[in-house]
Each structure stands twice: as structure tokens, then as C-alpha cells.
């Protein structure tokens, strides 16, 4: 039996919300940055990651909790996806870099989703793959399109000889067939 290599998807939460068009549009719908807009965008991102990662990857979404004095950095799991708000005083970037480093040390294939150039350079220099926030948005959209096609019923079309013969030739054959003998 072939053992599949473990895969880890690490998402820079707020960076993706602000940089990815799929989520930026949700936040832009409420320009005063109220909790409702970010909560809706966050929930959409979490649901997308749950659906996108599926059974093939473990996924972690890291949100920045550095300025929240009550944030302890304890992960919560929703739909199989770990959600971490970085501990008070520590930016999400450090948590993401540590997760990426730990994955590399454990020989786990990891992909970091962020448009933050500093994080991209840091993790790529450590041998970890990276994807931009917009690239992730396109991948999620493509994933949903494929899933929708998988769920759609397709009517099987009968492929006959008559459907493959040019119309003029078919007309002549029908004339020959219909002539009295």
C-alpha cells in the first residue's frame, strides 16, 4: 500500500480577506469595517477552506490577534479546520512562519496562502510552497465549479451513424431508401 504524504494548508486569514477579491467584496459591501462585514467574510473563508481542503489536507487559518489582549492563541476546530487567533502581542505572521517551519521539519508538504511578500519570501526560502490570496480565490472558485459539474445530471446523447453523416449525404441516403423498389 502506498502511503500518501501529509499535506498542510496554512491560510493568512486577514490577509486573504483584504487581498482576495472573493472576500474583499464582502468586506467592501460594508465600508465602515463593522464586525458584521468581517464576520461574514470570515465565515465565508472558513467554509471555503473546509470545502477546498476536503480530505486531502489538514488546514489551519491564522488570524491576527496581536492587538487583542484577551487572545490566547488557542486553536479551535470548525469542520476539521483549525482556526487560530495569534496570542496577544504576537502577530499572525510569526505563527504562520512557525507553522511552516514545523511542517518542513516534520517532512509535511505545506502550502501557505498569503499575499504578504515578507511571509512569502520567508516560507519560500524555507522550502515551503506559497499561493497568493487571489490565486486561492481562483482555486476555490474552480473547485466549486467542478463540484457543481459533478452534481449536475448529464443526459446521455445517443450517438448514431445518422448523427455523424453530413446532412447532404444523409438526405441522399434517405431518398434512396424511400424510392419504390
Image (spheres, rainbow, N blue to C red):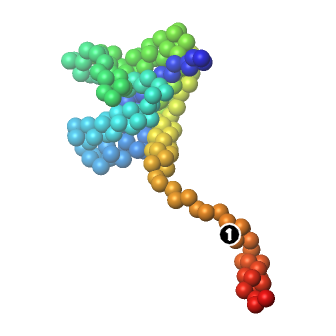
Which image quadrant is residue 128 in? Answer: top right
Q: Is residue 118 above or below residue 135?
A: above
In screen coordinates, is 62 left or right of 3?
A: left
Q: On the rendered image, what quadrant is the N terminus found in? A: top right
Q: Is residue 122 left or right of residue 80?
A: right
**Res 77 seen here:** yes
Residue 40 image-quadrant placement: top left
Task: Give the residue displayed 31% in from the left and 18% down from the top.
Answer: 75
The quarter of the picture where the C terminus appears is bottom right
Locate residue 103, reporting x and y percent: 49, 14
User: Percent from the top left, x then y, of residue 6?
Assistant: 51, 19
Extreme residue toward the front, this view? 181
x and y percentages locating residue 77 in the rendered image: 31, 23
* 114 sits left or right of 176 in the view: left
Viewer-proximal residue among 94 and 13? 13
Query: Looking at the image, which is closer to me, 65 or 168?
Result: 168
Q: Is residue 168 visible?
A: no
Residue behind mark 1:
163
Amino acid at each position: 500500500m502506498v502511503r500518501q504524504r501529509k499535506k498542510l494548508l496554512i491560510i493568512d486569514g486577514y490577509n486573504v480577506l483584504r487581498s482576495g477579491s472573493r472576500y474583499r467584496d464582502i468586506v467592501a459591501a460594508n465600508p465602515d469595517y463593522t464586525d458584521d462585514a468581517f464576520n461574514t467574510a470570515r465565515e465565508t473563508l472558513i467554509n471555503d477552506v473546509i470545502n477546498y481542503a476536503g480530505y486531502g489536507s489538514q488546514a489551519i487559518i491564522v488570524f491576527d490577534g496581536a492587538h487583542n489582549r484577551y487572545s490566547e492563541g488557542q486553536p479551535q476546530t470548525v469542520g476539521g479546520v483549525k482556526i487560530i487567533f495569534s496570542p496577544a502581542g504576537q502577530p499572525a505572521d510569526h505563527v504562520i512562519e512557525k507553522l511552516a517551519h514545523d511542517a518542513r521539519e516534520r517532512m509535511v508538504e505545506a502550502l501557505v496562502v498569503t499575499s504578504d511578500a515578507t511571509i512569502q519570501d520567508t516560507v519560500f526560502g524555507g522550502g515551503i510552497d506559497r499561493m497568493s490570496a487571489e490565486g486561492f480565490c481562483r482555486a476555490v472558485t474552480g473547485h466549486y465549479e467542478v463540484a457543481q459539474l459533478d452534481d449536475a445530471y448529464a443526459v446521455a446523447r445517443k450517438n448514431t451513424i445518422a448523427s455523424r453523416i453530413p446532412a447532404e449525404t444523409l438526405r441522399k441516403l434517405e431518398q434512396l431508401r424511400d424510392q419504390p423498389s
